[in-house]
Amino acid sequence: MKHYLIAYDVVESKRRVKVAKLVYGYALGGQKSALEVPVSFSEVKAIALELEEKIDADTDKVNIIGVGEEAILLGMATQLEYDEGMIIL
């Protein structure tokens, strides 16, 4: 399991809601359109395929970035920990 940062900029509201619902379903936390997601590589590939179907490639943007083991945390930032089987509410 690895942490990924999924950041999106979706122009049209209806598509943005669909993208947000998908990403928030996996997210531990984040800021509106930039969320930390703890998933396996195969899961992140599946998420990417679903996102690709929901966006308009001509106007929207999604970045999925692997977060390294040694994250640089500033201010109040903390590394969120996730154990398999854990339920985040």
Image (cartoon, helix red, strand yellow):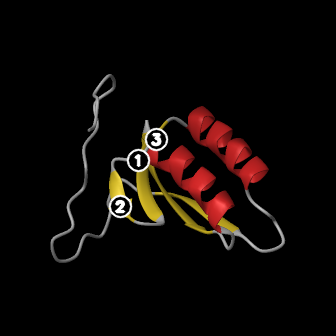
**Is 87 left, or right, of 5 in this rendering?**
left
Q: In which image quadrant can residue 56 be found?
A: bottom right
- The residue that mark 1 highlights is 27
Where residue 79 appears, as percent x and y from the top left, is 24, 55
Q: Quadrant of residue 63?
A: bottom right
Q: Kindly indicate the quadrant of the structure image that contains residue 83.
A: top left
Residue 35, given in percent of the width and then of the height, sits at 43, 58
As drawn, the label of residue 25 is 3
Label 2–label 3 contact, CB within 8 A: no
Q: Mark 3 near mark 1, Cβ–Cβ under 8 Å? A: yes
Per the image, label 2 sits on a secondary structure element best described as: strand
Q: Quadrant of the N terminus?
A: top left
Say which of 46 and 11 sits in front.
11
Farthest front residue? Answer: 14
The mark closer to the camera, 3 or 1, is 3
Which residue is disc 2 drawn over?
30
Up-down relation of residue 73 to residue 5 (above or below): below
Q: Residue at x 73, y 43 (%)?
A: 49
Residue drawn where x is 45% and y is 41% of the image: 26
Looking at the rendered structure, the kind of residue marked 1 is Ala
Q: Residue at x 61, y 62 (%)?
A: 16
Name the element at disc 3: loop
